[in-house]
Amino acid sequence: MASPLKVCIVGSGNWGSAIARIIGDNARTLQHIATTVKMWVFEENINGRKLSDIINTEHENVKYLPGYKLPENVVAVPKLSDAAMGADLLVFVVPHQFIRKLCDEMVGCVSARARGITLIKGIYEGPEGLRLISDVIREKMEIDVSVLMGANIANEVAAEKFCESTIGDLSKNLSAVLVKRIHDFQSSVSCIESFTSFSKCVFLFCLLVKNIVAVSAGFCDGLQCGDNTKAAVIRLGLMEMITFAQLFSKNGVVSTSTFLESCGVADLIATCYGGRNRRAAEAFVRTGKSIEVLEKEIFNGQKLQGPATSAEVYRILQQKCLVNRFPLFTAVYQICFEKRPVQEMISCLQSHPCDM
Ligand SMILES: NC(=O)c1ccc[n+]([C@@H]2O[C@H](COP(=O)([O-])OP(=O)(O)OC[C@H]3O[C@@H](n4cnc5c(N)ncnc54)[C@H](O)[C@@H]3O)[C@@H](O)[C@H]2O)c1
Ligand SMILES: O=P(O)(O)OC[C@H](O)CO
């Protein structure tokens, strides 16, 4: 029999800790997964104690997922190379701005037969233009990388409420590491649907900018516009996401069926109603404080991806003279970073071209 798969979770934030609960439970019950799951923790001092020590003694990530226990077989490891060494499956789940540096630190510790799966939302803007995070990891670490995306608000997953995800390009054996099995739940189910070989690039390019739309939805909530306006934001935002995918994905072909997966429209809706980006943008309107200040005040170390993604996308749209084709993305950037009045969000919706 092949030796059990060793899993390392690279990240231990809100989503990293929620997925660690699922992976840890699976590792205890599935024979093909090694029981001990290593979770890399960006070390922090919490009231005089190391976060990794707290996790390993109290089995709870008190900073990023308070109130939910982690399985005891999930072991917090503060040194990245120690966590990654010998892993067969690396689960990448850190805010996108840190991934390149972390990959650099891991090179040489990970065997060529290891596989990766990324749960990271966001896009990398490099000298050569916009890149998928999965491509960045693949190239830097020279391993195969799959993707898990979906309407997955971490606290709801941790609370074991029903949700779906989409996994691209991962074998059934490896997907099982991340799938919460239905019979584990009494009254609610978390179910992850797995399929392979869909047009990965297209869905990723569209999906990774959905957090910009969530910021726009939050602006509307802050302005108390109501659900009709928010529905317009979601519709127009989706149109821009599709156009973006058409322009920036490698083959430029968009399969509408991909947008109907959990990783498409479902994630967009979940984020526009329940996500952190939405909440921060609403507070931005109500308080007049900057996004940077609100991130610190409200989220206690958790990182927002939407405003940063809007800046990355705006720069590339400017370079390619495409700003006029993305009024909603552009308005979000300008309101967040150029002190444009938030009411411009509404005029942007009113004058948005129907035909993209
Ligand atoms: N939270 C969710 O509901 C959710 C759901 C689906 C996907 N995601 C995506 O998952 C990814 C990770 O998000 P999260 O919610 O787990 O993280 P988070 O925003 O909760 O936490 C921030 C993490 O970054 C770490 N960190 C801080 N400074 C660092 C540094 N200099 N270098 C490396 N790490 C540092 C912190 O220790 C912490 O673990 C993001 O791309 C996010 O969009 C999040
Ligand atoms: O809380 P947000 O805004 O980072 O969004 C969370 C997830 O992406 C929802 O699937």
Image (spheres, rainbow, N blue to C red):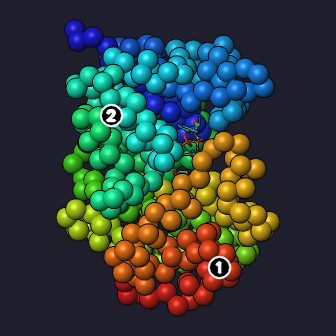
Whether residue 185 is visible to the viewer of this picture, yes or no, is no
Q: Is 26 left or right of 339, judged from the image as shown?
A: left
**Callout 2 amino acid:** Gly
- The one of 212 and 341 positioned closer to us in this rendering: 341
Residue at the spot x=60%, y=48% of the render? Answer: 303
Residue at the spot x=27%, y=11% of the render? Answer: 3
Q: Is 108 left or right of 237, judged from the image as shown?
A: left
Task: Looking at the image, tell me whether mark 1 or mark 2 is earlier in sequence order.
Answer: 2
- The one of 190 and 284 positioned closer to us in this rendering: 284
Q: Which residue is mark 1?
A: 340
**Callout 1 amino acid:** Arg
Q: Residue furthest front?
A: 127
- In terms of image quadrants, where is residue 344? bottom right
Residue at the spot x=66%, y=71% of the render? Answer: 219
When the figure is inspected, residue 282 is found, relative to residue 228, above or below; the finding is: above
Q: Position of residue 8 (x, y in %)?
A: 42, 24
Q: Position of residue 80 (x, y in %)?
A: 46, 24
The quarter of the image holding the N terminus is top left
When the figure is inspected, residue 308 is found, relative to residue 89, above or below; the finding is: below
Crowding at label 1, few (<14), some or many (≥20) Cα neighbours within 10 Å?
Answer: some
Residue at the spot x=34%, y=53% of the render? Answer: 132
Q: Which residue is mark 2?
A: 116
Tag 2 secondary structure:
strand
- The Cα–Cα distance between marks 1 and 2, rounded to whole angstroms, is 41 Å
